[in-house]
Structures are given as C-alpha cells and as structure tokens.
Image (tube, rainbow, N blue to C red):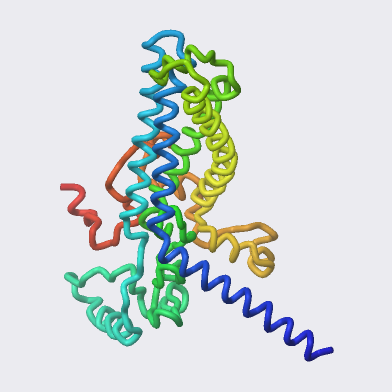
Amino acid sequence: MPACSNGCFQYVFYVAYASTRCGILMMRRGGFLFVSMASALISFCATVFIRYVSPAIASTPHGAHAYRGACAVMVVNIMYNYILCLITNPGVVPIRRLEDVMEFNHDESDDDADENVVTIDPLIPPLSDKQKWTSFCRTCKITRPDRAHHCSICNACVDQMDHHCPWLNNCVGANNTRYFSRFLVWITIACWYCSVLSFSPAVGRVSKMELSEMAHVLSTNMLLLGPQASMYALFLITTSSGILLAFLTTWHLYLIVTAQTSIEYQINRSKAAMRKNGGRVVSPYDRGSAHANWEHVFGPCRYKLWSFLPSLPRPLAVLSPRSRPKPEESMV
C-alpha cells in the first residue's frame, strides 16, 4: 500500500512538473501570439463600435461623431500604455557577482570622508545594511534588491516584480507598473462604455434597414448577419471582460496605495507577518500614507485623476539617486 501511494504521488508530481514546464515554454515561445490576440481584440471592438454601434445609438450625425471621439480617446490611451508596457524594461536586475558588490561597498565605506564620493547604486545596497536590503538568487547567482523576485519565464530577476503577464509578453515590475495600471483603468472604462452603449443594438432593436445603411450593403439576411453578429459579439466580449477587468483594476490600485505587489501581498498575509502586525496585512515598504504610496508609482500629482493621463517620464521614486538633482542644484 505505501508503495502504491508513493507511485501515485510521483505520478502526480511528474504531471504537475510537466504541465508547469509546458506552460512556461508556451508563454516563452507564444508571447507574440498573446500580444497579437490582445491587439486584434482591441481593434475589433473599436472598429465595430465606430462603424456600427455609434450610428445606431446616435440621433444625429454630430452625436455619432461624439461617441466615436470618446471611443478614439480611450483607444489612444489604451494602446499608448499597452505599448509602453511591452517595450519598457520592468526592472531587470543587472548581473553582478557577490564579490563585486562586497568590493564596491568596501571601497565606498573607505571614501566616506571624500565629499566627491559617488552615490551608491540602489541596486547595490550598503554592506552594513546588506542583510536587510539584499537577497541572493540561487538561479541567477546574483545579489538583488530585497523586493526583487525571479521570473522563470523571463529567466531574470525583476525589481518589485508583481507577475508575468502573457498578454504583455513581459513582467510587471518597478518600471512599468504605472503603465500597466493606466492600461487596466482605461481598458476597463472602455469595456463598460462599449458594453452599455452596444446593448440595444446587440439585442436587435435596430431595424434591418438601419443595419443595411450602416453596412452600406443590400438589405438581405445574409449580408445583414455581419453587423448584427459583430455588435452582439462586441457586447459579449466587453461585458465579460469588463467584469473581470473591474476586479483586476481594483486589486492593482489597492496594491499601489498599500505599497505592495501581488507577491509581497502573499508574503505579508502569512501568519507570522500578520501576528507581527496585529492581525493586519501591512507592507514593510509602506510610506505612511496612501498618497505617498500613490506618488511613489505615478509621481507627484495634485489631482489623482491626472495620474491616468499619458506621460513619458518615470516618477522620481523609480529613478536612481544618481539621476536626481542634488538639493543645492535644484535651488539654482
């Protein structure tokens, strides 16, 4: 009996291991496919709404143009942030040997009296604080920031890694979290916008004559199937996606205001961590307020809604100390 259970356990373990490896390989090799599918879905939904839905729900041509303009604004913001998520380095930790880090920190400590000492790279923490701020990756064989984690798909350590997103073919980390959050916000708004406005045309409250005029085709059942089916597909896609994305967007905004990533949340909610913090899930990287945590990701902003407008510069919190102006320089 023990031998049988042992064999079953080994079989289950082998199946789980093989499935995991296949999933990793699929996401490594099929990243372009996921990105293409996401881009095609966004393009399909935008085209159907602009071509068929907006004329069907508008009472005047100007009204149709207004609906199309709002849709265009959403699509521009979606694609802008989506592309930045794709091309931005999420925060891959450069490979450094432990000996190099030790030597660098030792040299820096010897030169403390020198007023021209170079600011230490944030990816190489001080030796005296090494246990608190550094960890070692057994896969990459490198020292890394305390918030970095190894991604088995990218085969690299990523600073402030949240997760690897197959739809981005990239990790979500320190450098592209703000773009990913904006992408989620805009695509959620767009999904509900299209879902609500496409409901009436999708359920068949548009006459066949109106459909033929929209499609610029003859009034035959076969030719009218395209616009009607497209609007119905748009309604189903945006409604189902909007529900899922609403939860995902809320979750990621919660992580931002609490200074956590998805991985860190699982660590912080462990029994030991919760006992230490009085039964509450608390991030050790919390900056004292939701406002400060928000600005750490999106940068200084007076009005929080402005954080979702397109921008290129990274927030100061992500820049290394070397790239920030010195106090005396900023006053000049």
Viewer-closest of 70 and 328: 70
Is 121 placed above or below 213 here? below
Residue shown at 57% from the left, 60% from the top? 265
In this rendering, does residue 296 appear at all?
A: no
Query: Which picture quadrant has residue 273?
Result: bottom right
Is 299 placed above or below 65 here? below
Viewer-closest of 264 and 193: 193
- The answer to whether 80 appears left or right of 284 in the picture is left
Residue positioned most to the bottom = 3
Residue shown at 38% from the left, 34% from the top? 75
Residue shown at 46% from the left, 78% from the top? 131
Query: Residue 245's spot in the image, x, y percent?
Result: 54, 43
Quadrant (top left/top right/bottom left/bottom right) for the N terminus = bottom right
- The answer to whether 96 appears left or right of 164 in the picture is left
Query: Residue 236's spot in the image, x, y percent?
Result: 57, 35
Residue positioned most to the right = 1
Query: Which picture quadrant has residue 48?
Result: top left
Give the total number of marks visible in the rendering: 0
Query: Residue 311's spot in the image, x, y percent?
Result: 30, 42
